[in-house]
Image (tube, rainbow, N blue to C red):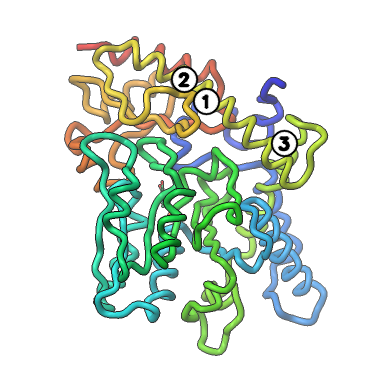
Amino acid sequence: MTFPLEFVRSAFCGLDDGWAYFDNAGGTQILEASVTALAAYLRQKNVQTGGTYPRSQAAAESLAVNRAAMARLIGAHDPDEVVFTPSTTSGFQLLARALAPQFAEGDEVVLTVFDHESNIGPWQVLAERGVTFRFWTLPGDTRVPRLEDLDALLGPRTKLVAVTWASNILGQVMPLGAIGERVRAAGAQLAVDAVAYAPHRRIDVNALPIDYLAFSLYKTFGPHQGVLWGRRSLLEALAPQYHHFIEAVPKKLEPGNPNYELAAAAGAITPYLEALGRRLAPETSGAGALDAAFAGIAVHEGRLAEQLLAYLRSRPDATIVGGADGLAPDRLPILSFRLAGWNAGAVAEAVEAAQVAVRFGDFHARRLIEHLGLASEGGVVRVSFAHYNTEEEVARLTDALTRFVPPR
Ligand SMILES: Cc1ncc(COP(=O)(O)O)c(C=O)c1O
């Protein structure tokens, strides 16, 4: 089955201005269906939930349906395990505050140097409880952390491990199953940043030994909103973040209520991916269709990644920051590199002449960029694909790199 690019591209806004958008790990384009759902919500249901009158009930029903759609996307059986947040960062900030009463002086938290700051900084609030932090690092300048290094950090006082599922710089998928088993065995909880992973691979929270997971819908084809998932019993044990008398999940973790119209926009993501899955595998539905969609996305994106990486491998002045094989199963199409003698910012600006949008910097994974010794010269150039990108667009980028950023 060939990847149905025409179906895919026509489902998105913003792809018709002639530009190739390769900053998808920064933010993807949004589904037309999300925009339609957002406008329809505001036009037809824009009242407070919780009233007895029909429109209020319709608004509440809309929120429930959209929460359930989000639960389907990540394999959660209980929609109340889905908390809508303004962003992933604020989701982790909220989780850290809500977990804080469970920590005591001398407890330990394991963080990593390869995470986005979003899953590092928010946990520092636990220092007020006397918690100490231990950092899981990368060996030398390699891209894959060693499980034995994690083992050495886990101990009887470890209460929480916070780790990313995939690096937003390296495109490296982390061995979450093996990590989760170790964290479980240590009697600790595991909080996962799935932001870089979610647009590219299927998430099934119940297939993994994890406790909390957060991701950003504006990087997953939807609106500027975040999702925080947690196992129900764990969410119930968290300190309320709304008014003291609001005790039910997820409400007690959504202060001031979630943004209803953004929830409506978010609710359109799962049906789109299910429709894509049915196109790729007509006999599937539900979870099977989502599996098929992400299987198709992985193959298409792998081809694009390999196209760019093959070009970079052919350039002696290029340093690929991450795995060099675009088809490797643990490699996401988030491709960072440097070209000798060029500032990363100059590279990003140069390819704009060919209407190609890429990005440079440390992408708020500053500890990783510093650990890798890449903080100077503008950090790295990052090219991140979404499944609506095409081989023609990638060829436009490689041509532009050859023409406007030649070896020097
Ligand atoms: C891997 C990763 N985690 C977390 C975040 C933060 O997400 P948000 O902007 O929703 O707080 C980002 C944003 O770039 C990211 O790439």
Residue at the farthest bottom position: 245
Judging depth in this view, the residue of 53 and 24 nearest the camera is 24
> What kind of residue is marked 1?
Gly
Left or right for 368, reference 311: left
Query: Which mark is on residue 277?
Result: 3
Q: Residue at x 59, y 70 (%)?
A: 232
Q: Are marks 2 and 3 in contact (CB under 8 Å)?
A: no
Residue 211 appearing in the image = yes
Q: Residues within 10 Å of mark 3 (few under 14, many from 20)?
A: many
Q: Residue at x 25, y 21 (%)?
A: 339
Q: Position of residue 177 (x, y in %)?
A: 49, 49
Q: Are marks 1 and 3 in contact (CB under 8 Å)?
A: no
Q: Residues within 10 Å of mark 2 (few under 14, many from 20)?
A: some
User: Disc 2 and disc 3: Cα gap in Å?
Assistant: 23 Å
The residue under label 1 is: 302
User: Disc 1 and disc 3: Cα gap in Å?
Assistant: 17 Å
The secondary structure type at the circle numbered 1 is: helix
The secondary structure type at the circle numbered 2 is: helix
* 395 lies above or below 132: above
The secondary structure type at the circle numbered 3 is: helix
> What kind of residue is marked 3?
Gly
Q: Are marks 2 and 1 in contact (CB under 8 Å)?
A: yes
